[in-house]
Amino acid sequence: MRCIDSRRRSTPCAGAAAAVCTAFVLAACSTPKQDRGPGEAGGARATPAPTVAAVAPAAEGGHRALPAPRAVRNWSELRQQAAERIVAANPESTYTGAVPDPLLAIPVLEIELNSDGSIRRIEVMREPRQAKETLKIAIDAVRRAAPFGDISRLPRPWKFAETFLFDDARKFKPRTLEP
C-alpha cells in the first residue's frame, strides 16, 4: 500500500504502520494485570512499539533479552528501530506518555555503529546543564539496546543522533518516538 500524498510517493504509508502499532497497544492494554512485567504497575504505561511485545524475560544481570533486530532499508527505519529497542531494553527507565513541560534534562548522543549494528563509539553532542547523571543513564540505555542490526547496505557514515527527553523522575523518552 502506498500513500496518495504527493510528498511521500516513494515511502510506505505511515497510516498502515500506525494501525499496526495501535493494534499492538490495544492488545497489550487488554492483558490481565497479573501478566504485566515489572515497571508496568497498574497498566499506567502503554506498550511503546511492536518490538516491545517480543521482549524476552529478564536475562543475566536483570536486563531484558531483546529479539534480533529487524532488517532496515534506510536511516529512518534504523532510527525508529533503535529508539524502540532502547525503550524495550530499559522499561524501568522510560516513559511513553506525553512529554512534560519543562523537561529536567535533554542530552543528545551521536551513536556510531559498526556494519553489524554493534556500537563503535558514542559521542556526547549536548550535555545537560543540570541533572548531569542523566547523560550516563542515556549512554547505558543505548549500550543495553545494542546491536541495532546489519547496516552494511546503508550509506556511510554509520552514525545517527538520538535526543533523550528526561522528566523530573529521571525517566526518558527518545525524541524519535515523539509524534
Image (tube, rainbow, N blue to C red):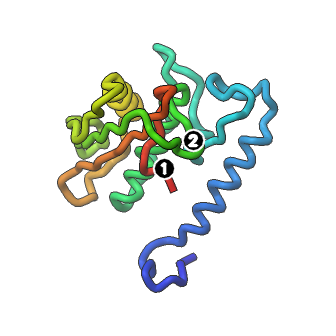
Give the amino acid at mark 2.
Thr
Q: Taking the image as drawn, is residue 113 in sight?
A: no
Q: Are marks 2 and 1 in contact (CB under 8 Å)?
A: yes
Residue 173 relative to residue 134: left or right: right
Residue 127, percent from left and from top = 25, 34
Disc 2/disc 1 C-alpha distance (Å): 8 Å
- Residue drawn at the location 48% of the way across and 34% of the way down: 167
Residue 6, percent from left and from top = 46, 85
- Residue drawn at the location 52% of the way across and 41% of the way down: 100
For the residue pair 11 and 106, the one nearer the viewer reads as 106
Query: Outermost residue, left direction?
Result: 157
Q: Taking the image as drawn, is residue 134 in sight?
A: yes
Q: Characterize the local packing of mark 2: few (<14), some (14-19) or many (20 or more) Cα atoms within 10 angstroms.
A: some
For the residue pair 44 and 76, the one nearer the viewer reads as 44
- Residue drawn at the location 38% of the way across and 51% of the way down: 79
Query: Outermost residue, front direction?
Result: 102
Give the amino acid at mark 1.
Leu
Q: Which mark is residue 53?
A: none
Q: Characterize the local packing of mark 1: few (<14), some (14-19) or many (20 or more) Cα atoms within 10 angstroms.
A: some
Residue 44 relative to residue 131: left or right: right
Displayed quadrant of residue 103: top left
Q: Which mark is residue 177?
A: 1
Q: Say above or below: 133 vs 94.
A: above
Disc 1 is placed on an element classified as helix
- For the N terminus, give its image quadrant: bottom right
Q: Which residue is mark 2?
A: 96
Displayed quadrant of residue 125: top left
- Residue drawn at the location 25% of the way across and 40% of the way down: 126
